Every structure is written in C-alpha cells, then in structure tokens.
Image (cartoon, helix red, strand yellow):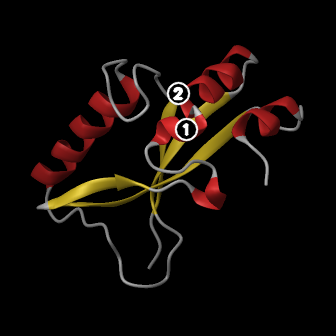
Amino acid sequence: MGTLRKTCESGNYNTVILTFLSQFGPQIEPKVRFADGLCGEPITTCDLPSQIEYCQSQGIKVFLSVGSASSGSQLYNIPTAAYAKELGTYLWKNFLSGQDGPLGIVTLDGIEFFFQG
C-alpha cells in the first residue's frame, strides 16, 4: 500500500484527491475517512499534513472529496440552503483557511463534491 508522498513522487499526477468527508448533515458530526488505509485515526499517525505539504511543494494540488462512493446508506445530507452554508463554513475553517483543523494548519487546494445516488 502506498502513501500520499509516494503517489506524489511518482510524477504521474498534477492533482490528488483525498477521499472522503463521508459523514455530515444536521446533527451529524462530520467525519473524514481516508480511503485505502491512507491514514489511520488520529490523522497524525501517518503524518498526513507533512505528506500534503510535500505534494504541494512539488506543484501537485491536493483536494478533499466530500460525499462518498458508497452505495449503501448515505451518511451525508444537505437538506437546506442554511445547512449548505454551515457545511461550507465547516469546510473553509477546517481544510482551507489555515486554522487549526483535522490536518493542523495545512491548507488544501480545494474541495471536490462526489455524491452518488
């Protein structure tokens, strides 16, 4: 199993997408679950922030995917415009602003939405 750093060292990518923020919604605590064992919990167990910074130093954009490829029961819901704004604020604060979030002060380059069903 590879790491994010090895993926970026391959020279095959100009963008990588971390998957997924797969659990969110009104009265549902947001949860990031990285695919393929990329990182355990807490995220610091694999030093994901330094791997993200490495990729970015190589000119590779790093995005977070919101949603899930799961075809089972959905663990996400955006029922109203007000909640969409709340989710946007959460994403900004925790992944794009440089404030201390799940990845420390590391900022991602963007967000990708992946909703199935």
The crowd level at tag 1 (other Cα within 10 Å; few <14, some 14-19, many 20+) is many
Say which quarter of the image contains residue 16. Answer: top right
Q: Position of residue 8 (x, y in %)?
A: 78, 32
Q: Residue at x 34, y 21 (%)?
A: 97
Would residue 41 be found to the left or right of residue 90 on screen? Answer: right
Quarter of the image that includes the N terminus: bottom right
Residue on which the image places disc 2: 109
Q: Residue at x 69, y 21 (%)?
A: 54
- Pick whichever of labels 2 and 1 is earlier in the sequence: 1
Q: Position of residue 11 (x, y in %)?
A: 89, 31
**Mark 1 falls on what kind of element?**
strand
Would residue 54 be found to the left or right of residue 48 on screen? Answer: right
In depth, the one of 70 and 52 nearer the eye is: 52
Amino acid type, residue under disc 1 in the picture = Phe
Q: Are marks 2 and 1 in contact (CB under 8 Å)?
A: yes
In depth, the one of 11 and 35 nearer the eye is: 35
Would residue 89 be found to the left or right of residue 54 on screen? Answer: left
Amino acid type, residue under disc 2 in the picture = Asp
Residue on which the image places disc 1: 63
Residue at far top of view: 57
